[in-house]
DNA sequence: ACGAGCGCCTGTCGGC
DNA sequence: TGCCGACAGGCGCTCG
């Protein structure tokens, strides 16, 4: 589910509040509840439950696909992986089937980490470096220039699709937005990174920023996010459009498997050579 | 340094 | 209706 735009959408909702949801900023953690032990990667539950109690949520940040809850003393880091979601609820609401971790907050509300497939993880720590230190640049960083991006691409012999999914190369892209960005840039997913011209690299960076910006503006690629108003799935150019005509040229969209991930592209608009 | 394959999990969908 | 495989937004690991 969540790539950079979805994580950013959730972050905004939790910070600013949204209809039915008050902001959780400034609230105190009164109690925590862990319903699936593996969801808490570290530390052990006893320590976490004791130390988190009484801390306030000072700020909510994001790095790549990681959500960062800056607390009074520690940081709660959450990665939603495939099916994770964060919900604000009244304390007396029934606990949904797939809730894995719940923070009970001051003011009669709670923050629930809901995660059907149980891949999501939470870390409670004072040092985020081991988790975030190896991440690549943020796509919207002003320090990431077309020239700098081109140089990074030239250092790799990898195919574009797996490279863009590698969070140490660039932080935040997932399967949907990678396919969309490559299509928009007119680049084949199997193209070798070190064969791109400066102009192609610049177009790729621009395309990445465009599709991510569209994703954020439409509140994420929902599918099962209807309640949140996510709308990006109505704007897919290639993702999950196998066999359907390319919006640009009418050629049927092709699907291949690459590193266990479905990969969608237009064979005409994204030629393997040039 | 790279790609391929698997494990972690639950749910949905299409074919037979 | 029921069963079975394919597939799903991610990522860490091993192996060649």
Image: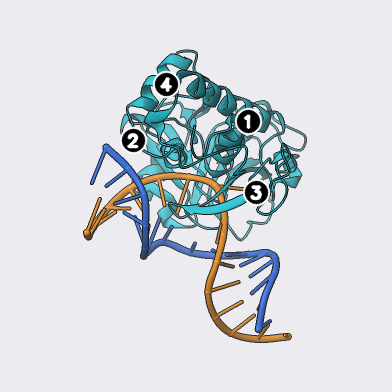
Chain colours: A cyan, B blue, C orange
Q: Pointer 4: residues within 10 angstroms few (<14), some, or many (20+)?
A: many
For residue A162, side relative to residue A212 (left or right): left
Q: Nearer the viewer, residue A265 or A262?
A: A265
Q: Give percent across and percent down for residue A148.
A: 41, 16
**In which quarter of the view is residue A127 placed?**
top left
Q: Can you say whether A149 is above or below A185 in the image? A: above
Q: Return the residue at label 4.
A: A150
**Contact check, label 3 and label 4, Cβ < 8 Å:** no
Question: On the rendered structure, is A153 left or right of A254?
Answer: left
Chain containing mark 3: A
Say which element carries label 4. Answer: helix
Looking at marks 2 and 4 on the same chain, the residue that comes earlier in the sequence is marked by: 4
Q: Which residue is mark 2?
A: A157
Mark 3 vs 4, N-terminal side: 4
The one nearer the camera, A243 or A16, is: A243
From the viewer's perspective, is the residue at label 3 or at label 4 nearer? 3
Q: Which residue is mark 1?
A: A211
Q: Circle 3 is placed at which residue position?
A: A253
Chain of the residue that carries numbered disc 4 in the rendered image: A
Residues at marks 3 and 4, CA–CA distance in whole angstroms? 28 Å
Q: Which mark is residue A170?
A: none
Q: Where residue A5 sits: x, y (%)?
A: 60, 33
Image mark count = 4
The CA distance from mark 2 to mark 1 is 25 Å
CB under 8 Å between discs 2 and 4: no
């Amino acid at each position: 589910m969540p790539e950079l735009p979805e994580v950013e959408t959730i972050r905004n909702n939790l910070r600013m509040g949204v209809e039915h949801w008050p902001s959780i900023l400034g609230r105190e953690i009164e109690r925590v509840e862990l319903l699936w032990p593996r969801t808490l990667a570290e530390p052990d539950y006893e320590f976490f439950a004791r130390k988190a109690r009484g801390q306030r949520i000072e700020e909510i940040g994001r790095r790549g696909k990681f959500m960062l809850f800056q607390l009074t003393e520690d940081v709660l880091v959450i990665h939603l992986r495939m099916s994770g979601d964060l919900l604000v609820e009244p304390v007396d609401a029934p606990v949904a089937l797939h809730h894995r971790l719940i923070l009970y907050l001051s003011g009669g509300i709670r923050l629930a980490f809901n995660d059907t497939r149980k891949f999501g993880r939470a870390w409670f720590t004072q040092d985020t470096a081991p988790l975030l230190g190896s991440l690549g640049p943020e796509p919207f960083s002003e320090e990431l220039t077309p020239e700098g991006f081109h140089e990074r691409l030239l250092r790799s012999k990898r195919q574009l699709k797996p490279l863009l999914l590698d969070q140490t190369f660039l932080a935040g892209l997932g399967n949907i937005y990678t396919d969309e960005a490559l299509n928009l840039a007119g680049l084949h997913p199997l193209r070798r990174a070190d064969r791109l011209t400066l102009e192609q690299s610049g177009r790729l960076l621009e395309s990445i920023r465009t599709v991510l910006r569209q994703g954020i503006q439409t509140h994420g690629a929902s599918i099962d996010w209807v309640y949140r108003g996510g709308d990006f799935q109505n704007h897919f150019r290639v993702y999950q459009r196998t066999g359907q005509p390319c919006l640009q040229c009418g050629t049927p969209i092709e699907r291949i498997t690459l590193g266990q991930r479905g990969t969608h592209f237009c064979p005409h608009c994204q030629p393997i050579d040039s």
